[in-house]
Amino acid sequence: MQLLNLSVLCGSHMIMQHGVPFPLEGRDVPYSRITISFLQKTYVAGTDESGVWKITLDPAEPGGPYVLAIYGTDTTEKLIEDIYIGDVWLCSGQSNMELPMARLKDEYPEEWNPPVNPLIREFRVPIAWDFGGPRDALSGGEWLPAAPETLDSFSGTAYFFAKKLFEKHPIPQGLIVAAVGGAPIESLMSKEALAAFPHKIAEGEKYADPQFRERTINNAGAAVNSWEAALKKNDRGLAEGWYDPGLDDSSWEEMHLPSWFSSSALGDFCGVLWFRKTITIPPGCPGGEYKLWLGTIVDADRVYWNGAEIGCTTYRYPPRKYAVDAVRKGENQLCLRIVCNNGNGGFTPGKPFHLFSADHDIELGGIWKYKIGFTISPRPADFFIQWKPMGLFNAMIAPVLNYPVRGILWYQGESNADRSDQAAEYAALFTALIQDWREKKAAGRVPFLFVQLPLFGVPEENSETGVWAMMREAQGAALVVPVTGMAVALDLGEWNDLHPVLKKEVGYRLALAAEAVVYGEKNSAPGPQVYCVERRDNTLVVKFSNCGAGLRANSPPYVSIVAGVEAVRIPAVIKDGDTLLADLSGIKNPEKLLYAWADNPADRQISNADGLPMIPFRITIPRT
């Protein structure tokens, strides 16, 4: 029966958007009669010559659970069960939207404690791409109610957003998550949205040619496979069993870990390194089960404990968290096989780096033995076809735009923050994406809520060269688009991690944006924002909105004045709860004022009384 060819979004456990008509579409034999029964109403339609039928359900109030029955040819019945009606959110972007709750279990273990709210539900759109044009249907997926056994797979940002909203608006919350790690914004944009960027359209359309696409993918894969094979074949450590706990490593070199290899004699090493460390469990301490945390490692690792492999990770971003089940009292041997791809390898400083149990904690930082297993040229670049323009939009976004939602959540930008020219064009790309998605949804100004990039990198003084600062400016520029809201995440980042774990706080700030933009409630989101700049002789007066009960500083605040090629750091003064004063005396020809303007600004002291950080800014100083 072709009747079963209903959108996978319309399945059991689904959340339907309340208060709006809800379209349904499916297939049966041509020129047949379709009957739908839902909420004590009956809907009838006929199929066309292709067997397609379309029916629109009347708006409904929040509630559930409900059953929707579809009757097709020969009275065949299809039931969609456990339906709830509430608010639905399309959640898109890259890895920080995709990041699952499983990665956050050590930060928020209480979230798995029953009861977990089953009225928060997620539909995870499978990763797919298409360069031949927009698809009508998704490749798969299902609705999952939140529960201890399903929560691992939920988007952390989206889940915490929904959980916070449910506290004030206790109706079912549906999350359609269509996010892909590493995705630049243009991969999630349609051809129409990219009309002002023809070079991006041309780049994407190249991959509509199946022969070119297959050749490109195969060539890139073959180069990587050849490099990996050479590494495995020539690694002396594997051949000679350097993971053997009885190996004599007294002649090996020494290195202090965690650290970047570039700071050692290795420089820009590419290849395989082996590290060993003897760990002694004192007689009075328990053996048995321990956890081994090694932070993040660039690029890949394989871990051996007393000669047995206990885990591996194949790329740089996931935190290395391994279970060690056979820790014995006395001496134990920990051995790590590290693969460095492109000369920037190492153990990320500042991350947890220890072996621990409930009763005992052993810090692993310090001197380790190491030896080179094999040296090789840099690894050929991986090819991610899904990151090319339009590919993800066509396969993952276009098929869901007809599904009614209350709003859109967006967390993306890191992959467009590599260079200043990318940041410079992002504002136009982002605005075009918002407008295009709204037009294609044909639902008016659907609210669009987004996360501004957090801090990243080592702390720096204000500088106009900060690419992430430029990206934050480009993202914030979208607030001029009607019915948009922003969650400022500057203080929620980690200087040494692209994937910070404070997703509960990010989700809660998105919920604040939703309360203001979607539900019309008054709050101080997104945080203090410049709305007026005056110069009174040598005093610059900057006024802010969204201050709540007033501006606060966790330490004496500072700003920077750009004068020519220099940026002069000076103190600032908070006045009247909504004003910042800067003394320009002694600064010749001041041009701009910078606040929190760096990839990781050292000066970011100000927030409002609700704890929302001041939005980073650079403003032109009026002339006298």
Image (spheres, rainbow, N blue to C red):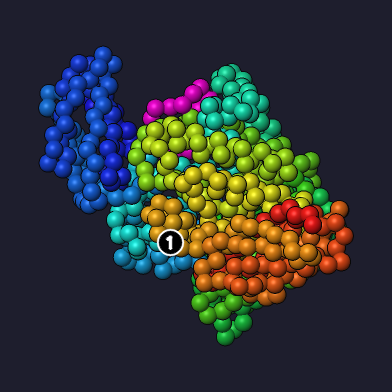
Q: Is residue 357 visible?
A: yes
Quickly name the residue at label 1: 522
For residue 132: magenta? yes
Residue sitting farthest toward the bottom: 284
Q: Can you say whether 255 is above or below 281 in the image?
A: above
Q: Position of residue 177 (x, y in %)?
A: 43, 45
Residue type for callout 1: Lys
Q: In this view, does 292 lie to the left or right of 68?
A: right
Q: Position of residue 23 (x, y in %)?
A: 28, 33
Q: In which quarter of the image is residue 297?
A: bottom right
At horizontal 56% and vertical 79% (from top left) the residue drawn is 360
Magenta span: helix, strand or loop, mainly? loop
Q: Is residue 279 visible?
A: no
Question: Along the line of sight, which residue is nearer the eye, 561 or 111?
Answer: 561
Per the image, label 1 sits on a secondary structure element best described as loop
At horizontal 78% and vertical 64% (from top left) the residue drawn is 537
Question: Along the line of sight, which residue is nearer the eye, 594 or 589?
Answer: 589
First to last magenta residue range: 123-138
Q: Can you say whether 271 is above or below 282 in the image?
A: above
